[in-house]
Amino acid sequence: MLLARVAGTLVATDKEPSLEGLSFRVLSQLNTENEETGSYVVAVDAIGAGVGEVVMYATGSSARQTIATDGRPCDAVVMAIVDTWEVDGEEKYHK
Amino acid sequence: MLLARVAGTLVATDKEPSLEGLSFRVLSQLNTENEETGSYVVAVDAIGAGVGEVVMYATGSSARQTIATDGRPCDAVVMAIVDTWEVDGEEKYHK
Amino acid sequence: MLLARVAGTLVATDKEPSLEGLSFRVLSQLNTENEETGSYVVAVDAIGAGVGEVVMYATGSSARQTIATDGRPCDAVVMAIVDTWEVDGEEKYHK
Amino acid sequence: MLLARVAGTLVATDKEPSLEGLSFRVLSQLNTENEETGSYVVAVDAIGAGVGEVVMYATGSSARQTIATDGRPCDAVVMAIVDTWEVDGEEKYHK
Amino acid sequence: MLLARVAGTLVATDKEPSLEGLSFRVLSQLNTENEETGSYVVAVDAIGAGVGEVVMYATGSSARQTIATDGRPCDAVVMAIVDTWEVDGEEKYHK
């Protein structure tokens, strides 16, 4: 999984029918120093993550292992809101 | 998922039989500022996206989770036409 | 999918038994301007593509969605010979 | 698989329910010289790897082939603690 | 698939139980000129490839399509020892 900040939202009316009702989030990828890397991904939000929150997302077939995304053409899913992480004993982020 | 502009079309007569009837689109990848990144992918169009439209596409096994692509050797699918997205409260694209 | 030129062939006698009889092609990846990018992949040829031809290939689990590659340790397959593609109304390649 | 040092831990209370009870590790990727590359991934720990240990991790659907991760939205798993590796007859790491 | 030279071996005693008995190889990736690219991967050896041999490896779910790796948390497998390949009519490697 990778870390990201929920940077925004995306609306798409005309889409594969199985995606109806899902929420799309624009994620700005973070490194372990809690700095934005400049990379992004659009992910389905499986847990109710708001804009500004720091989250983890999974990609590939693993992104379909939630009730919201099972069997759908979705390759990235927000699967956790991060409370905190530390690297080498130093806290790098705290919610 | 990633964002892209439908840049063009591709024709391939001689192909794996299960791909018969599918439409291929040349996608030019976009960043969240709605700028082209220079990367591309050829995707199957599952929803009827025309040249010039801004879309989302899914890759990997998730690209086979549509009726059009199920069980086919397809690793990228256009699964939504984007209406709008915003980043940090600023609208970056509007259809 | 990505575009490639069939640059050459590869022979491997000592291999996983399920790969017996498959043809391996060395693919040189192309961008949408029909220029070689310098990246390559070795793919199984599912459709009879000759050296010099311009093809599309699929990767990952999608590379196993052909009769030739089903259930085999193959992560790239040539699944179409390209006739033509265009970008922004301009033909970039014609067979 | 890739090599990594377990650099830290991550806590996420609000997450996809199927992830309950799993331990997340922040991994700092290593090259074969046992040097950190600057890349990271957050992985589920399937084997009890502590901070500072050198491990191997698997990604993608292969990350779900453990009892801990089966059927869960997890795309990276620590699946081995490394004792030693050598390159060109030279030992590059010893636990 | 990609080309690689078997650069070394890796030992991991403490690992996911399903990996018991498998041989891990440190692979140094090759380009089509038979030059090392500097990238590496650790792969399970499904065919008995020795250090120094030039091989092909498959990644992702395709790495689990061998008897040795089926159902195991393994995302890279050596599936062929290469005899020879040629690019643009020129032999680039011969065993």
Image (tube, coloured by chain):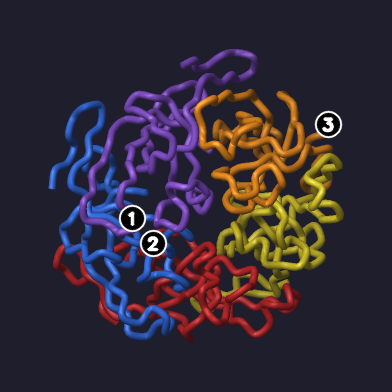
Chain colours: A orange, B purple, C blue, D yellow, E red
Q: Position of residue C14 (x, y in %)?
A: 37, 85
Q: Position of residue B92 (x, y in %)?
A: 52, 16
Give the camera-side residue of E38 and C18. Answer: C18
Image side of residue E77 versus residue D30, left or right: left
Q: Residues within 10 Å of mark 2 (few under 14, many from 20)?
A: many
Give the label, 2 or 3, closer to the camera: 2
Q: Mark 3 belongs to which subunit?
A: A
Quadrant showing the C terminus of chain E: bottom left
Report the amino acid beneath label 1.
Answer: Tyr
Q: Which residue is mark 3?
A: A95
Q: Residue at x 66, y 75 (%)?
A: D84
Asked if both marks, 1 and 2, belong to the same chain, the answer given is yes
Q: Residues within 10 Å of mark 1 (few under 14, many from 20)?
A: many
Of pointers 1 and 2, the one earlier in the residue sequence: 1
CB of mark 2 within 8 Å of CB of mark 3? no
| Image position of C51 with respect to C91: above or below | below
Give the camera-side residue of A11 and E41. Answer: A11
Q: Which residue is mark 1?
A: C57
Q: Position of residue D57 (x, y in %)?
A: 65, 62
Report the amino acid beneath label 3.
Answer: Lys
Q: Which residue is mark 2?
A: C76
Q: Secondary structure at mark 1?
A: strand
Q: Secondary structure at mark 3?
A: loop
Q: Is residue D90 visible?
A: no
Alpha-carbon span between mark 1 and mark 3: 44 Å
Q: Residues within 10 Å of mark 3 (few under 14, many from 20)?
A: few
Q: Residue at x 22, y 39 (%)?
A: C85
| Location of residue A78 by image quarter | top right
